[in-house]
Amino acid sequence: MSNNPFDVKIGLAEMLKGGVIMDVTNHEQAKIAEDAGACAVMALERIPSDIRKDGGISRMSDPEMIKEIQRSVSIPVMAKCRIGHFAEAQVLEALEIDFIDESEVLTPADEHNHVWKHDFKVPFVCGCRNLGEALRRIAEGAALIRTKGEAGSGNIVEAVRHMRTVMNDIKKITTLNREQLVAESKNMGAPLDLVIKVSENGKLPVPNFAAGGIATPADASLMMQLGAETVFVGSGIFKSEDPAARAKAVVEATTHYKDSDKVLKASIGLKSAMKGLDMSEIPDSERLQERGW
Amino acid sequence: MIEVGVLELQGNYALHHNIFSDLGIRSKGVKLPKHLDGVDGLVIPGGESTTMSLLLDTFKLREPIKDFAKENSIMGTCAGLIMMAKKIEHETKVVPLNILDIMVNRNAYGRQIMSKKMSINLKLNNELMPLNSTLIRAPKIIDYGKDVMVLTMLENSPAAVMQNMHLGLSFHPELDGISIFHELLFNPSSKYYWNNLNKVDAA
C-alpha cells in the first residue's frame, strides 16, 4: 500500500468538515481561535484586508512565525504559498504544515501554471470561481476546494456567486450525456475524466468549502446552506471589534447552520463586524479573485 | 427497526450516515440533547476533539451522552475515540467523556505528513478479516484497564477496543467504506453483532 495516497490527503479535509478555519497572524490569535472552537487555523503574516490596504508583494509567511503558531495550538495549522511557487510549498512541507493553501491572496509567482500538487505529501487547498477552475485544481492534485470569494472585502457577495456557480455547473452536467460532456469539458477547460466523475456523482470528488468575505454568523449559515461543507473566515474575525466572541459565534452558527434560532442566538450581543467594502469600491485590477488560471 | 445517532458538532459525520445507509440502518444527526431521544446508539465521528469538547459543553450534551452510554452503544473513531477516553496524556483543553477505560495520546502519530494507510487484521468468530485502515493525525491508546478488550493492534498499540457495548477506533473505517465495525456494534441481526459473537480474538 502506498504511503500518503490521494485519499489520505482528502481524509484530513473530511475531518475539517462542519467547522470553521480561521486566519491568524500570531500565536495569541491562534490560541483565541482554538479556544473558540476553530477546527484549524491558517497562519499568515497579514490578513487579506491589510494586504489589500498595504499593497506591495505578498509572500509566504515567515517560517519562524508559522513554527510559533504550530507550537501554540494542537489543531491543524495551514499556511499559504503563492500561486505556482512550488519552492515556497516545499518549504511549507519541510515545516510539516498540515495543509497548504495555494492562494490568490498572495501575489502570484507564475502567470500560467499552478503547483503540481501530486508531488507533495502535504495536501493542498485551492480557490475556484466555477466548476472548470475547481476541476483543473483537482487534476493538479488539490485535495480540497474552496470558493475564492473576494478575500479581505468583508463582503459575502462574491463567495455566494462562486458557490452558486459551482453548484449550478455541477447540476447542469449531471443532465448531460457523454458526447455533451466532451463538449462541456472543452468549454470549461477541465479534464474529461473528472467531468464524467462529477456528472455521475453529482458532487466534487473532494470536499467543497467556502471562503472570501465571511464576516458574521449568518454569513456562515448562508454559505453552509448553499452547499459549503466548512467555512474559512479570514479578516472577518480579527478585524472585528471583539474577535473571541465573534469567533465562537461563527463556530456555533456553523454547527447549527439550519437552525435559525441557534443562528439568531449566536448573532446577539456581538460588537461591530469588520467594516467591509462594496465591490464597486474595488477596481478590477485589485480583485484578488482574478488571480489563478 | 433501530436508529443510530451520529454526533454532528463538527467532523466527518456525513460518511457515517453513508455507511448506515449501505447497511440499511436508519441514522440521524445529533446536535442537541433532544436529538438523543429515541435513538438506539451513537457514533462520535472524527474531526477536531478541541472543537467537539467545547461544543459538547456549549450545547449541554456532555451529561446526556454520559447517561445515554449507560444503556446504549457508542462508537468513536479518531477524535471520537479521544472523546470516549478516560484520560488524555498532556492535555488540558479536551475534556473526555470517560466511557472507555483507556488513556490516549492525541495526535501521537504526528502531523498530517505522517498520516497513512496500513493493513490490519480483525478476527471475529474465528474468521480472519484483513482490512485497510486510514490514520489521519491519529491518536494512540497508550494504556487500558482490565475490562477493555483489544480487537486489533497497529504498531504495537491497540487500534480497536471494546468495553461492554462500546467501541473505540484510532482509525477511520468510514473513509475506506468499511462497514464491519458499524455492523458489529449496531446491527443485532448480524452474526458479527457484538452480543452474538462466540469469540473475539486479538489478531
Image (cartoon, coloured by chain):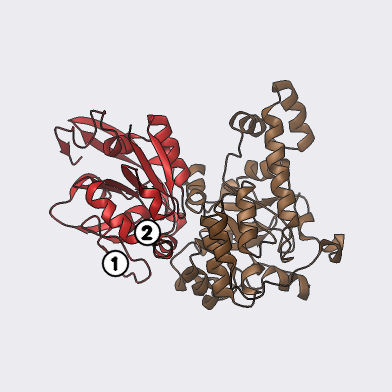
**Is A142 on the left-hand or right-hand side of B201?**
right
Residue B18, position in %: x, y? 45, 36
Question: Could you tell me the amino acid type at mark 1?
Answer: Glu
Residue marked by disc 2: B61
Residue B163, position in %: x, y? 20, 49
Report the number of numbered marks: 2
In the rendered image, is residue B57 in sight?
yes
Of the pair A236 and A205, the residue shown nearer to us: A236
Residue marked by disc 1: B89
Question: Could you tell me the amino acid type at mark 2?
Answer: Leu
Chain displayed in red = B
Residue A19, position in %: x, y? 52, 57
Specify the subunit that label 1 lies on.
Answer: B
| SS under mark 2 | loop
Residue A109: quadrant of the picture: bottom right
Of the pair B54 and A211, the residue shown nearer to us: B54
Work out whether mark 1 precedes mark 2 in sequence or the reverse, and give the earlier one: 2
In the rendered image, is residue B156 in sight?
no
- Marks 1 and 2, how far apart at CA: 23 Å
- Determine the residue positioned at 49% across, 74% down: A31
Chain displayed in brown = A
